[in-house]
Image (spheres, grey):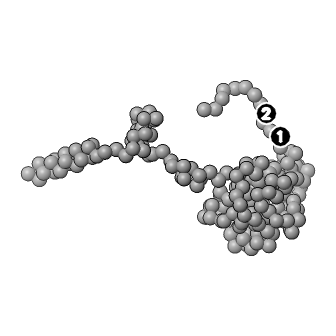
Amino acid sequence: MRGHWTAVVVAAMATACTTEREPASRTAVSQKLPARFSTIGRAASNTEIRAWDIDVNPTGAGLPAGRGTYARGAQVYAEQCASCHGAKGEGIAPNPKLIGPDPRDFSFASDAKIPRTIGNYWPYATTLYDYVNRAMPFATPGSLPPSDVYSVVAYLLAENSVIDKQMIIDAQSLPRVRMPSRDRFVLDDRKGGAGFR
């Protein structure tokens, strides 16, 4: 008898689930996707897309409002970065060394034992903002407000002898910073081959 009532309950639940009206957003998505994906997920809203559209490219496109200083950067670095990268940016294994402008001759291109740092290797100051903003601090990535990210970038650039400690870093000044190794990198101008889809 117990098995009979279990079957009745399961059948009633199955009927209720199949007759439930599908949300309009799911219907719209399922019409655009292959049938095997029609019941998985939903389309992201414009608000959700904007919240994740935070990348900054080498030209500085995508940099937000805010401003940073060396002094504030030193404080944020000590609080948020030094435990992994060292008090002087020397790196604490397995975390990389961040500060060290030498060698500036790009000799690590032929000697992998020489550490690559922001000061001797990084080609764009704007993408330093992008990386810190999206990926750091390691335990809480994306948690720093824009002015703190600008400040950490100002601190790291000044400690690597790229900018003066008095320089204010913001969306206008950061793209104008020319990294010492910038000319060591070239655009990939290869043509041909299958296009990406």
Amino acid beneath label 2: Asp
Note whether residue 34 is visible. yes
- The reply, left or right, for residue 186 in relation to residue 135 is right
Q: Residue 25: where, in percent of width, then height?
A: 42, 44
**Quadrant in the picture for residue 82:** bottom right
Density class for disc 1 (Cα within 10 Å; few <14, some 14-19, many ≥20) is: few
> What residue did someone put label 1 on?
186
- The reply, left or right, for residue 31 in relation to residue 84 is left
Q: Residue 140: where, in percent of width, then height?
A: 60, 64
Note whether residue 156 is visible. no
Q: What residue is drawn where x is 80% and y is 73%? A: 71
Q: What residue is drawn where x is 65% and y is 57%? A: 134
Q: Residue 48: where, in percent of width, then height?
A: 54, 52
Q: Is residue 183 above or below residue 36?
A: below
- The reply, left or right, for residue 196 in relation to residue 82 is left
| Cα–Cα span, label 2 and label 1 | 9 Å
SS class of the residue under badge 2?
loop
- The reply, left or right, for residue 74 in relation to residue 23 is right
| Residue furthest out toward the left | 1
Q: What residue is drawn where x is 26% and y is 43%? A: 19
| Residue placed most toward the observer, 181 or 46 | 46
Q: Mark 2 and 1 residues: CB-CB less than 8 Å, in contact? A: yes
| Residue placed most toward the observer, 106 or 40 | 40
**Quadrant in the picture for residue 84:** bottom right
Density class for disc 2 (Cα within 10 Å; few <14, some 14-19, many ≥20) is: few
Amino acid beneath label 1: Val
> What residue did someone put label 2 on?
189
Q: Residue 155: where, in percent of width, then height?
A: 80, 66
SS class of the residue under badge 1?
loop
